Amino acid sequence: MLQVLVVTRPNDFFRTGVNFTNNATVMSGTERNQVYLSLGSSTVRGIIPNNDFERYNLTFKNVFSALQDKLRLTFSFKFVRENDKNMLAQGQYFNPLTSVYLFPRGESFDAIKEFESYDVARNINLQNWSYGDDLKMQNPYWVANRMLRTTKRNRYLTDLGVKYHLTNWFALEGRLRWDEAVNKLEDKRYASTLDIFAHSPYGYYSYSKVNDRSFYADIMADVSKRWGDLSLVANVGTAFTNTSYDVAGFQGGLKAPSNIFTPNGIDYSRVSSDNRPIFDITRHAIHSVLGSVELGWQERVYLTVTGRNDWDSSLSNTAQQSFFYPSVGMSAILSKMFKLPKFVDFLKFRTSWASVGSAISPNISSAWRYEYVPSTGTYHTVTYKFLDNFYPERTNSWEAGMTAHLFKEAMSVKFTLYQSDTKNQTFLRQITLGGAFNREYIQAGDVQNRGLELSVGYNKKWNDLRWTTNMTYSTNSNRIIRLLDNPNETLRQGGLNGL
């Protein structure tokens, strides 16, 4: 009796990955004018079939000084082009590795290398896979070659900086920064892809264009002055940040005939949250006034005070449209102030307190919000109930610590204690009493985070031999001090947001 040995070799699915990187740089200049130009490229061929990545970048920078070095101009421009195809997803969706790793032992892997076969009735190629769809498995070669996801990205970054020294201790400076990324995303899933992914027996198509822009500008006054044992470093100014995010496109299962990957080929008559136009606009602006002052005495004791006030567009139509967050810190180098034992080379204590504010998510407080309804193909106003007063999330924290160098710098000890309390967190919860709203935004919570960290290091050198070792111990605890003001109320957040 002749026995045939069937060899299962899923490792044949992989290919050798290759990464080519090329760079060319030119630098030139004089004492007061320097120019830098760089060109680079990266081409990556992944170990998964049909997984590729390309990146090309151009960088130019010029630094110019004039007026006896009192004026300094800095300009830079960077362009980045990226093209990727079939970037690997984690988990079981859009991931060929699930089918590769769970392929039945004793079966021939060669049988699925021909991942599609011609169907006479439909006049198209269909997926060749007869091992079931548990865990949403498909032919791994089909996932790699007939579920195609591509992204084309062009990114432009421009920086301009001007700094002028009016005196040797006082200067004015301003900065502008522009960052824009244009993304084109395309997703093609051929007919006979699992319905959970294609949403149609004729295939699936998605196309969207994403514009992501960010503009930043600031004007600062800088002071650095000494009077005998006293020193002063101060910065004060104003800043402006504007971001925008625009998305427009189409997505959905296709109508007959199969595999016509155009927006007109999408079957919008099929009621599904995946068969719909893609559209989103977000605008966000922050105006800030900020400053910091550091006072020093004999380079032994330092007092630092900072403050910032933000007018955030996320807080439009709310009671508090701006928020202020200060901080104060002090450090003292005791080894310079007192006579300590000889084995103490350096000893420093520090403590600080800070209050940090962060606004709610953009557009929450907008008076006009709409939601797409797949069954009618139209938009309707959202049925969220909003707070009369939204407040920024606030985190108050303090920290105290010590740094010591001992035994001729051979040993170092660092110790830190910290605690923070976060309040006014924003949640969206269900309303069970009915009425005009089915969900509402609330602000609640007081979450405390506290802990300590101790680090001990040893560094010793014997002639040409150096030995360095470090040991760190840390502990951290989080505690919900308060959730809702009314103890009879409930807040349930399922899934990954769980509470």
Image (tube, rainbow, N blue to C red):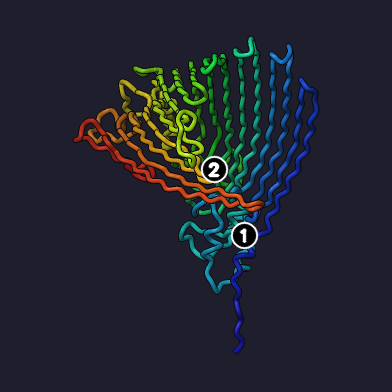
Secondary structure at numbered mark 1: strand
* Mark 2 Cα-neighbour bin, 10 Å: few <14, some 14–19, many ≥20: some
Amino acid identity at mark 2: Lys
* Mark 1 Cα-neighbour bin, 10 Å: few <14, some 14–19, many ≥20: some
Give the percent coordinates (x, y) of residue 363.
Answer: 43, 25
Give the percent coordinates (x, y) of residue 227.
Answer: 54, 14
Quadrant of res 316? top left
Relative to 112, is 426 above or below?
A: above
Can residue 105 be seen here?
yes
Q: Nearer the viewer, residue 90 or 239?
A: 239
Which disc number belongs to residue 385? none
Which is nearer the N-term, disc 2 or disc 1?
A: 1
Give the percent coordinates (x, y) of residue 370.
Answer: 42, 27
Q: Residue at x 40, y 33 (%)?
A: 399
Give the percent coordinates (x, y) of residue 60.
Answer: 73, 28
Q: Nearer the viewer, residue 149 or 332?
A: 332
Q: How many marks?
A: 2
Amino acid identity at mark 1: Glu
Question: Residue extending furthest bottom?
Answer: 1
Secondary structure at numbered mark 2: loop
Reading the image, the residue beneath label 1 is 116
Reading the image, the residue beneath label 2 is 408
Q: Nearer the viewer, residue 361 or 484?
A: 484
Q: Nearer the viewer, residue 186 or 475?
A: 475
Left or right of 164 in this view: 311? left
Q: Residue at x 55, y 58 (%)?
A: 97
Relative to 494, is 308 above or below?
A: above
Q: Nearer the viewer, mark 2 or mark 1?
A: 2
User: Where does the N terminus fall, quadrant-wise?
Assistant: bottom right
Give the Cα separation between the discs numbered 2 and 1: 72 Å
Relative to 343, is 315 above or below?
A: above
Left or right of 489 in this view: 302? right
